[in-house]
Amino acid sequence: MINSTMTQSVTLSGVGLHSGEMTQVTIHRANTGEGRYFVRVDLPSQPIIKAQVSSVGQTTLSTELVAGEAKVRTVEHLLAALTGCGVTDARIEINGGEVPLLDGSAKLWTEALQQAGMVSDFKNADPICSPIWIYDQDLFVAAIPSSELRFTYGIDFSYSAIGKQWYSWNPSLEKFVDAIAPARTFGFADQIEHLQQVGLIKGGSLENALVCDDQGWLNPPLRFENEPARHKLLDLIGDLSLLRTIPQAHYIAYKASHHLHLKLAKAIQEQTL
């Protein structure tokens, strides 16, 4: 649900992927330099949770931010939308502990931001100085010095519907709202029962996630032939957004995870301090 009647503010509500609980988010412009931050308006003291690397909590199938006892989970799609739309300062009010999944992508977030007139060009910080590589066996993420900002993501799954996919995106050549935002999260039918038993994906459904089994997709059609790879790239942008502005570099990831994305963000932050 979208309500953009307030000048420069938008409100969306929906179910959380992991909690299965309904929450509402209202995005307001913040003062220049304040950065992006969440406000838990459902809690008595309305604690602020800053969208920064030092706020990261757990990273199991989503990115969580914490401030004291206050938490907000699955922030990556919303933060990617804000970053892709050039919104560097935002007060994000939320009445629960998980950002709504909506349709599983960043499409509805970007549409709401467009309606509120909050969209501008993708912004990046100064170039990184030297290459950074983060490995975990054959999984890796990297930031390579580059004359332009670029993101490249590769995935490899045993499910024939996905297989091996690569996608490379340059924000100066393709708009985030067209190339990245519509890519939806995805999952596997044979893993659903186990994940729900351990308290995850309680709010997942065929309406907010692509799901496949060993025979193919259960809920086609796809929005892009390589939609899963594009969605992983969306997640990477959301996680790197915790740097506030992403430094100019060529970011390359292969079979990575939120955990590796955030290790890269920390390494970049240490290099650029």
Image: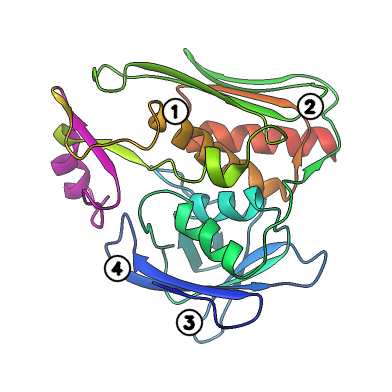
The label nearer to you, 2 versus 4, is: 2
Q: Is residue 167 above or below residue 103?
A: above
Disc on the earlier residue, 2 or 1: 2
Circle 4/circle 1 CB separation < 8 Å: no
Location of mark 3 (residue): 43
Disc on the earlier residue, 3 or 4: 4
Q: CA distance from mark 2 to mark 4?
A: 41 Å
Where disc 2 sits, the SS reads loop
Any part of residue 53 in sight: no
Location of mark 1 (residue): 229
- Residue 86: percent from the left, percent from the top? 71, 53
Front-most of residues 55 and 39: 39
Residue drawn at x 79%, y 72% is: 31
Q: CA distance from mark 3 to mark 4?
A: 16 Å
Q: Which mark is residue 148?
A: 2
Where disc 4 sits, the SS reads loop
* The stretch drawn in magenta includes residue 96: no
Circle 3/circle 2 CB separation < 8 Å: no
- Residue 126: percent from the left, percent from the top? 86, 37
Q: CA distance from mark 4 to mark 1?
A: 28 Å
Front-most of residues 55 and 119: 119
The label nearer to you, 4 versus 1, is: 1
Disc on the earlier residue, 2 or 4: 4
Circle 1/circle 3 CB separation < 8 Å: no
Q: What type is the residue that disc 3 sits on?
A: Leu
Front-most of residues 230 and 190: 230
Circle 2/circle 1 CB separation < 8 Å: no
Dot 4 crowding, Cα within 10 Å, few <14, some 14–19, many 20+: some
The magenta span reads 191-214
Location of mark 4 (residue): 21
- Residue 137: percent from the left, percent from the top? 47, 13
